[in-house]
Each structure stands twice: as C-alpha cells, then as structure tokens.
Image: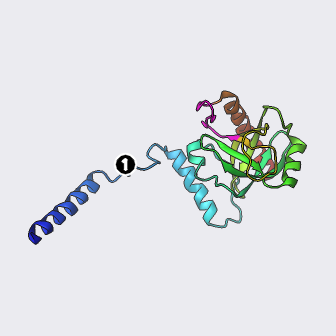
Amino acid sequence: MQKISLFLIIVCFLSCGLFSCFFPYPILSNYTNLNAKNIYEINTYNEAELTAHQNSEKRVLDLMWKDINPLFENDIPYELIALHNNSSFFAVRTGGTNHADIEPASSEEKQSMEQFFTTNEWKCYPVLLKLNENTFIPASLSSYPHGYQTLNTSSGHFCLHFKNSKTHKTNLIDQTNQDCIKEATKKGKIYIKQEQ
C-alpha cells in the first residue's frame, strides 16, 4: 500500500512538472489578455507607487476599466481634476463594478465640487483621476447624485466612467461617457504639460 501511494505521489509530481514545462503561462490568470502596452503601463505605475522619484515625468495612462478597477481602491480619498477649469476636489470610491461609484470625501469637498460642476443634471465632465503624484487616468464624471450614499456628504453617489466601463443598469458601454473620456485624455495631456 505504501509503495502504491509513493508511486502515485511521484507520478503526480512528475505530471505537474511536465505540465508546467509545456504551459508556463498562467492560464487561469485575470491578466491573460493584456497587451504589451498595458503591461508596461501597469508596471510603470507600480514602480512609481513603490519608489520615490525626484524628477519623474507626469503621465496620463490610457488604461481600460478592467485594469483600472483593481488600482482604484475603495474608501481612500483621490483627487479629481476638472479639466474644463482645472479645479479639483477629493472623492472616495464607495462601490461600483461596471464603473466606479464615488462620493465627495467630506462636506467641504462637496462644496468644492459644486463650485465647478452643475449638480442635479445628467451631464458628463472630463476629469483626471490622480492615482499618485505622477500618474493620472482620464475619466468621465456624471454630475447627478443618485442611488445609495455611504458618506452622507451628498444626496447620493456620482458615476465615474473610464475607458470601456459600462453602466450598471444596461451593462453596456455608454458612448457619451466614452466621448467625454477621449476629451479628458486630450485635455489631460495638455494639463500635464502645463503642470510640469
């Protein structure tokens, strides 16, 4: 019995070793369909997060929502820059799966937001999400508060869309938001050049 068990264990190890030799790529990974540009940008972002750079160049990353989603954490204040007047306020991601649901980080930040956004109407604004000192993501902010709220800083949450994000209700990509994100990409690159 012990010889059979030992034989089966050895066969199992050899089979696993052979399988990993022929299929070294992580087949079940969430990141199997990233292209080289996405991988470079994610690695560059991670390096910027982990190391201090004195003279790092600021950049606007052109990433898909599926790649942004794990980087954009809940319950942490992030700066949003409104590109129509270069103002900013801090918001917190409170949820969302097809896109990010955000709320102003405080009552004061809600007042800052209301100074340059017309709230209570379904209008999209091109914005930059500041991930760190050198990394910005173009986005589209819907200025209508609706649905749930967790921070009690507004009468609901706001939708923040990114490249290829979808609406929660239809589960489809909304072209109006995608056009706004393209505008945010163009204006964001101009904003970054002016800031450097």
Q: Residue 24, percent across and down?
A: 33, 54
Q: With 74 as the anchor, is 8 left or right in this view?
A: left
Of residues 54 and 41, the one nearer the viewer is: 41
Q: Residues within 10 Å of mark 1 (few under 14, many from 20)?
A: few
Q: Residue 36, percent across and down?
A: 49, 46
Q: Which residue is mark 1?
A: 27
Image point (22%, 63%), residue name: 13
Q: Residue 96, percent across and down?
A: 63, 44
Which span of residues is magenta-colored? 160-173
For this orientation, the residue located farthest to the bottom is 2
When the figure is inspected, residue 157 is found, relative to residue 173, above or below; the finding is below
Image point (56%, 44%), residue name: 66
Q: How is the image coloured?
A: rainbow
Predominant SS of the magenta segment:
loop
Of residues 46 and 27, the one nearer the viewer is: 27
When the figure is inspected, residue 71 is found, relative to residue 191, above or below; the finding is below
Q: With 91 as the anchor, is 172 left or right in this view?
A: left
Name the secondary structure under disc 1: loop
Q: With 165 as the anchor, is 35 left or right in this view?
A: left
For this orientation, the residue located farthest to the top is 175
When the figure is inspected, residue 163 is found, relative to residue 49, above or below; the finding is above
Magenta segment: does it hold 146?
Answer: no
Image point (85%, 40%), residue name: 117
Magenta segment: does it hold 171?
Answer: yes
In the image, what residue type sits under mark 1?
Ile
- Asked where in the image residue 145 lies, by quadrant, the reply is top right
Q: Residue 55, percent across and down?
A: 71, 62
